[in-house]
Image (cartoon, helix red, strand yellow):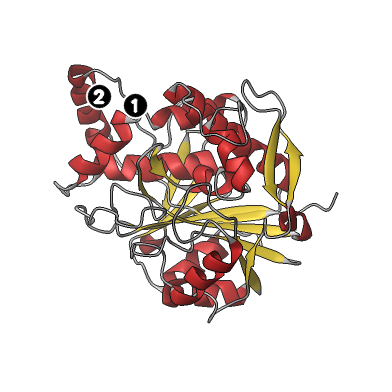
């Protein structure tokens, strides 16, 4: 099987204490999060590096990519969300075009497992064209001609991850994520982008049902669904080895995902761009940046994350060896 990698650009901030689910414990621990000094590496164990810039420009995106020190080579898949028709929060082609061209990338997606405007290849390509992505690079709907299976080692819910068959054609993956809220996962970042995002329609249903079905979303316990996302991500990461990287853009911070055709308007200001070779550290840094923000609008995104217990995705992902919640934030604006 051909090895390929995934590039994720990600933004990280100082790792903060995990919060509880009861209102009182959440309030106390959230206070601790906000008071912890920035850029202080957590105690104990090795911290992953997360690069951060407050600028959200094509030049800044290139800067965080190059800071990672891992060049995307060969046939490069750039995994992003093309955005559901009707929504407008997705990463704009004008922002990402320079990076996509730098790596000679092909924008990749898989069809959705719900109705809407991206549930079949023809409609999905039309949405990608309407949103401007086909003007900057070829777009490959990876499950247009079927699906393939990647093994998932050590999972509680999944033994395999079902991905679009074209994914195996790529040598390297750049995971280019828009960090924001999510109606089911609490938040969507790098882990969601390589799990549900790279999964075929059947694979998406397998994840949503916590391994029970490829024909139905089922009704699993919330933590089982979150754990299944992490397990699917592990299948992709194990397949890619070091041929993957992660970049996350924290703008248009709606509580809703780009898969929503009518997402809520963002109520929190833009934060910046983060990048890492560790998707867990990257997602954790993005979450921490929300908590440590001085923007009062953050309460809406925090409520979405906590009400869905979204942090459990990171706890479980760390437990199964995807990455570390401990990170060192490198502020590129101070260099």
Residue drawn at (68%, 47%), measured in percent from left and top?
A: 163
Quick one: which residue is furthest to the bottom in this view? 135
Q: Nearer the viewer, residue 301 or 27?
A: 301
Location of mark 2 (residue): 29
Front residue of 65/20: it is 20
Q: Are marks 1 and 2 in contact (CB under 8 Å)?
A: yes
Residue at the limit of the structure toward the right, as seen here = 1
Q: In the rendered image, is residue 323 in sight? A: no
Q: Which mark is residue 162?
A: none
Could you tell me residue 234's position as x and y percent? 64, 36
Q: Earlier in the sequence, mark 1 or mark 2?
A: 1
Which residue is at a point 49% across and 40% down the rendered structure image? 281
Query: Relative to residue 172, is residue 46 depicted above or below?
Result: above
State which quadrant residue 40 falls in: top left
Is 226 placed above or below 300 here?
above
Q: Position of residue 261 (x, y in %)?
A: 35, 57
Q: Quadrant of residue 111?
A: bottom right
Which residue carries the number 1 mark? 17
Dot 1: element: loop
Q: Is 20 placed left or right of 100 in the picture?
A: left
Q: Is residue 246 above or below residue 187?
A: below
- Residue at x 78% of width, y 60% of height: 169
Residue 181 vs 108, above or below: the answer is: above
């Amino acid at each position: 099987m051909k090895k390929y990698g995934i590039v994720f650009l990600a933004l990280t901030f100082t790792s903060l204490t995990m919060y509880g689910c009861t209102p009182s414990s959440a309030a106390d621990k959230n206070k601790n999060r906000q008071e912890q000094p920035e850029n202080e590496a957590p105690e104990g164990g090795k911290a992953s590096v997360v690069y951060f810039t407050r600028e959200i420009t094509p030049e800044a995106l290139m800067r965080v990519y190059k800071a990672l020190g891992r060049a995307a080579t060969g046939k490069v898949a750039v995994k992003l969300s093309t955005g559901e028709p009707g929504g407008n929060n997705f990463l704009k082609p004008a922002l990402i075009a320079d990076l996509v061209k730098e790596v000679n990338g092909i924008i990749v997606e898989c069809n959705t497992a719900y109705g809407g405007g991206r549930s079949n290849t023809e409609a999905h390509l039309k949405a990608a064209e309407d949103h401007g992505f086909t003007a900057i690079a070829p777009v490959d709907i990876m499950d247009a001609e079927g699906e393939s299976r990647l093994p998932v080692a050590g999972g509680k819910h999944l033994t395999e991850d079902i991905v679009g068959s074209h994914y195996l054609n790529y040598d390297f993956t750049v995971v280019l994520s828009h960090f924001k809220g999510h109606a089911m996962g609490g938040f969507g970042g790098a882990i969601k982008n390589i799990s549900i995002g790279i999964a075929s329609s059947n694979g998406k249903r397998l994840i949503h049902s916590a391994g029970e079905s490829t024909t139905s979303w089922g009704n699993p316990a919330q933590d089982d669904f979150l754990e299944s996302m992490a397990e699917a991500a592990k299948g992709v990461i194990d397949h890619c080895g070091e041929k993957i990287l992660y970049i996350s853009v924290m703008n248009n911070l709606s509580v809703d995902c780009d898969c929503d055709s009518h997402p809520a308007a963002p109520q929190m200001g833009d934060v910046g761009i983060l990048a890492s070779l560790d998707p867990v550290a990257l997602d954790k840094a993005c979450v921490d940046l929300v908590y440590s923000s001085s923007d009062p609008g953050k309460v809406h995104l925090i409520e979405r994350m906590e009400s869905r217990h979204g942090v459990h995705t990171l706890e479980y992902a760390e437990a199964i060896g995807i990455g570390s919640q401990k990170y060192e934030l490198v502020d590129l604006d101070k260099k």
